[in-house]
Image (cartoon, helix red, strand yellow):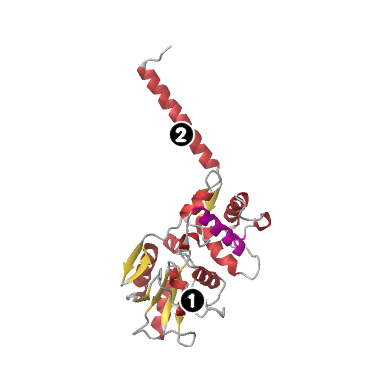
């Protein structure tokens, strides 16, 4: 028997609501991966001398590692909640399998690669994105870095002039590849005394940079401030290592000496924005 048009329409609405509700319930039933915590672990864990887990990241890292294992990219013995060099390499292989190259296959979980890895397995929360590339002061950076610099300038109460930006197309031998990705800048200290240089580094650290005042005694470079945006998913491998060392209380240089910068509570840009 054919239903009257109004009755048929009502039945269709009820059916659609039922299907939508079922899909929503299925999504809610999936576990979630905290992207902020996962990316943080991928920067810190490879630089550790032991197998200490990054606080707050274990459950999310396990979900990522299990998905990599099931794709035969990671041996089961490495599914341990520790995002070390083996897991970074496995994630880079996964990114390459998606067709990503260069910074898109740097082993740090990006929004697209992490979401696709989790399809049907987990959802992704607390998403981080570097944003589009933009020109600032004649140098290329991304919008996340630009926002961080603007806030550091506000805290410091004076301008910060860039000497080198990100996404270095030719490579600078004195930078050891740290500027070849996103999130990394060098800042001029011309006209700054020692106290102002320290204050500038402190402001940069407060908003989520690993920042150090570099001196000519440390390498083949003039006085400047080197700053790397924590958890920028476009970071070069060398810059990732500097972030990990910063969390471990080191100076980000090859000798891995103790951190010589101002002491602040280490926070990412996202954590800073939460207050």
Crowd class of label 2 (few under 14; some 14 to 19; many from 20; radius 10 Å): few
- Residue in the foreground of this view, choosing between 167 and 143: 167
Q: Position of residue 183 (x, y in %)?
A: 43, 67
Q: Which residue is mark 2?
A: 20
Q: Nearer the viewer, mark 2 or mark 1?
A: 1
Which residue sits furthest bottom? 217
Residue 14, picture quadrant: top left
Q: Secondary structure at mark 2?
A: helix
Magenta stretch prevailing secondary structure: helix
Look at the image and tell me whether residue 229 can be seen: yes
The verdict on residue 74 being magenta is no
Q: Position of residue 51 (x, y in %)?
A: 65, 65
Q: Position of residue 231 (x, y in %)?
A: 48, 63
Quarter in which the C terminus is drawn: bottom left
Q: Position of residue 226 (x, y in %)?
A: 44, 76
Q: Which residues are magenta?
A: 82-98
Q: Which residue is mark 1?
A: 176
- Residue in the foreground of this view, choosing between 2 and 192: 2
């Amino acid at each position: 028997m054919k239903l009257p048009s109004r009755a048929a329409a009502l039945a269709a609405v009820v059916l659609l609501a039922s299907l939508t509700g079922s899909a929503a319930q299925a999504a809610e039933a999936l576990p979630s991966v905290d992207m902020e915590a996962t990316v943080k672990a991928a920067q810190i864990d490879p630089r550790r001398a032991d197998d200490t887990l990054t606080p707050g990241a274990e459950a999310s890292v396990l979900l990522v590692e299990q998905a990599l294992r099931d794709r035969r990219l990671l041996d089961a013995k490495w599914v341990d909640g520790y995002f070390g060099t083996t897991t970074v390499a496995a994630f880079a292989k996964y990114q390459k399998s998606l067709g990503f190259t260069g910074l898109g296959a740097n082993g740090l979980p990006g929004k697209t690669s992490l979401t696709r890895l989790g399809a049907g397995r987990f959802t992704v929360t607390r998403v981080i994105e570097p944003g589009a590339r933009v020109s600032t002061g004649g140098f290329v950076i991304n919008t996340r870095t630009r926002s961080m610099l603007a806030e550091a300038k506000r805290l410091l109460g004076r301008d910060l002039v860039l000497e080198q930006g990100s996404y270095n197309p030719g490579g600078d031998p004195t930078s050891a590849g740290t500027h070849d990705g996103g999130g990394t800048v060098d800042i001029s200290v011309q006209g700054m005394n020692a106290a102002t240089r320290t204050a500038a580094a402190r402001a940069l650290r407060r908003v989520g940079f690993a920042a150090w005042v570099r001196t000519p005694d440390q390498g083949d470079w003039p006085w400047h401030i080197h700053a790397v945006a924590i958890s920028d998913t476009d970071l070069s491998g060398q810059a990732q290592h500097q972030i990990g060392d910063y969390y471990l209380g080191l100076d980000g240089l090859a000798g891995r000496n103790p951190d010589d910068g101002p002491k602040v509570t280490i926070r990412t840009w996202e954590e800073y924005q939460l207050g």
